[in-house]
Image (spheres, grey):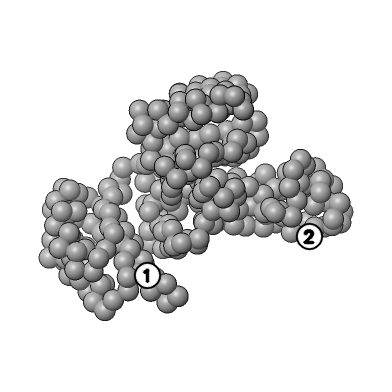
Amino acid sequence: MKTYVLTVTCQSARGIVAAISGYLAGRGCNIADSSQFDDFETGKFFMRVSFRSEEGIPMQDLHDGFKPVADTFGMAYEIYDADRPMKVLLMVSRFGHCLNDLLYRWRIGALPIDIVGVVSNHFDYQKLVVNHDIPFHHIKVTKENKPQAEAQLLDLVEQSGTELVVLARYMQILSDTLCRKMSGKIINIHHSFLPSFKGANPYKQAYERGVKLIGATAHYVTADLDEGPIIEQDTARVTHAQSPDDYVSLGRDVESQVLARAIHAHIHHRTFINGNRTVVFPASPGSYASERMG
């Protein structure tokens, strides 16, 4: 028995759900989980269906067979093998809390991904990565060599079959060209003080202003710096009794959790880019365990 995920985006119309469920039933498939959303402002419809094929019908056959249904409604659609982990490339600079968290979740099976490599513009985490039997790639980035560095990164993406790039506190700005080429396939994490506290030591700036909430935002990368469609956010409360170091420690915890949740949603095809926003379907109670363990 094979499990697949169908994702659909199109203009809203009557009969879409019936057509999808009718097609799957006609192919002997059982729907395990289904989520849908009508955006009344844009008129767009989004749907994610997890289903099982007891007869083990090949994914390509299901994909090709669905085309007449998709053509009827003008759908953009994909069918994914739910048992195949997504190929992910991690990128990091000198802050390692997100990288460490992701490697731990990956190691215990809580984040079922295929880490094809880790890229860094420094050597700080080379030993950590190699000890996990993951390829480490050092790509030095300067003002002079940035085009060559990005070309090297793109070569690595293509050679490794990377499907998602995760900026796990990678502190280099990606070019507009790279952002457009990999639109919807790069996730970044940053503290939620932007744009209030820019530059060096934002947590110290927040402390000096008496901020009571600190947080983090995970988003898709676009040419607009730190302004891509938001996938996940969270906050932690702080008080006057806590120090700037406490702010930093709490902030790192929140960043790690938010980034992991954003990746989890993306690799299970629960995220849809909707203009400058996202549609993110939650994992249902009955499906979370299977999603978590792949």
Tag on residue 117? none
With respect to residue 175, does 274 lie above or below? below
* 121 lies left or right of 31: right
Tell me the tag on residue 44.
1
Mark 2 or mark 1, which has the lower sequence index?
1
Left or right: 197 in relation to 225: right
**In this picture, residue 25 sits left or right of residue 9:** left
Q: In terms of depth relative to the viewer, which is nearer, 55 or 245?
A: 245
- Residue 175 at x, y = what percent? 53, 39
- What residue is shown at x 59% (from left), y 57% (from top)? 233
Q: Is residue 104 at least partly visible in the picture?
A: no
The residue sitting at the bottom extreme is 14
At mark 1, the secondary structure is strand
Q: For the residue marked with disc 2, what is the amino acid? A: Lys
Q: How many marks?
A: 2
Q: Nearer the viewer, mark 2 or mark 1?
A: 1
Q: Position of residue 37 (x, y in %)?
A: 39, 70
For the residue pair 284 and 171, the one nearer the viewer reads as 171
For mark 2, give the secondary structure. Answer: loop
Q: Amino acid at mark 1?
A: Lys
Please report the residue visible at 42 percent of the width from the left and 77 percent of the height from the top.
40
Tell me which corner region of the image, top left, top right, bottom left or bottom right, holds residue 34.
Answer: bottom left
- Could you tell me which residue is drawn at 53 percent across and 22 percent down? 138
Crowding around mark 2 (Cα neighbors within 10 Å: few <14, some 14 to 19, many 20+) is few
Would residue 145 be visible to someone looking at this image?
Answer: yes
- Real-space CA distance between mark 2 and mark 1, rounded to the nearest whole angstrom: 38 Å
Quick check: 70 above or below 255?
below
- List x then y, in percent, for residue 176: 51, 42
Identify the residue position indicated by label 2 in the image.
212
